[in-house]
Image (spheres, grey):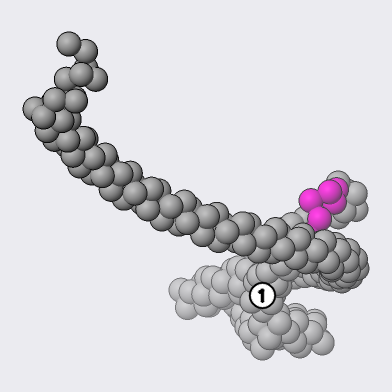
Amino acid sequence: MSILQFYNTPYGYRQGVLIDAEELRQMRAENADLKLKLAQEKRLVKEANGLLDRQESQLERLKQQKANFEHHLKLNSAACEAKIEELTEHFTFRKAAIIRGQEQQLQALQARVVEVEEEVEDLTSRLSNEQDASALIKQHLNDQQARVLQLERETGEARVAVQIEQNPSASAVQQFNDQHHRVLELEQELNELRTQPFPPGQWEAIQNHVAQLHANDTAERELPLRLEVERLRNELEEMRANVAGADPLIDWTDHDEQM
């Protein structure tokens, strides 16, 4: 029996209807699944299209922002280059002016150092001369003091010789008179040495010179000047460091040789 003949029988017809209904249900179920998947895919496609549109819009905005940024960058670069050139020129002139001012101060300090050093040398020479003069005065005073002591000793010896003289002869009287006369001469010379140990006017000159030495204490005057020289030298070194820091290409060899 063929399939067509089988479906023509009542049993076959019923089986065929059942088979068609089952297939129809499966097809409907599959169709519903396909519709659901299609709806999901459409939704996904729609969302993807929306996302793509947003990304394209954002890309356009980014391109516009990039163009604006490049334009502002060119403008700012030109302005910055002009400002850099202006500041470079300004600081070049300012640096040159500062260096010139510092060089002038440096020259003034060098001149001041030379003046103070010459003044120190002059004071040192004067101090040496005054010390030599003081030494001569002290030596002369010591000689005069030794002379006074010698005269006092001779006077004492003469007085002792007069007192122990006991011979009443004419020669003894003459000797006594000679010794007494010698004693008077020695006492007179001693008094003169005590009252005026130097020739007239010399003692006052020596006293005035000694008073001037005490009034013009060279050691006390020399110390501040030496401190001033040290301070000026420190300022000179500091000025050199500042100038060298402003322009490291400066060579100080000529300045040092001049000093």
Answer above or below: position of 253 versus 123. Answer: above
Residue 250 falls within the magenta-colored stretch: yes
Query: What is the x, y in percent for residue 46?
Result: 47, 56
Which residue lies most toward the top here? 1
Which residue lies most toward the left here? 11
Residue 122 falls within the magenta-colored stretch: no
Quadrant of the image for the C terminus?
A: bottom right
Q: Label 1: few (<14), some or many (≥20) within 10 Å?
A: few
- The residue closer to the viewer here, 46 or 60, is 46
- The residue closer to the viewer here, 54 or 184, is 54
Quadrant of the image for the N terminus?
A: top left
Tag 1 residue: 224
Q: Is residue 223 in sight in this rendering?
A: yes
Query: What is the x, y in percent for residue 235?
Result: 71, 67
User: In this image, 109 relative to 189: left or right?
Assistant: right
Q: Secondary structure at mark 1?
A: helix
Chain part drawn in magenta: 246-251
Identity of the residue drawn at 26% across and 44% down: 28
- The residue closer to the viewer here, 209 or 36, is 36
Identity of the residue drawn at 12% across and 33% down: 14
Q: Main secondary structure of the magenta part?
A: loop
Quadrant in the rendering for residue 147: bottom right
Answer above or below: position of 224 versus 77. Answer: below
Identity of the residue drawn at 38% across and 48% down: 38
Say what amino acid the circle numbered 1 marks: Pro
Identity of the residue drawn at 45% across and 57% down: 47
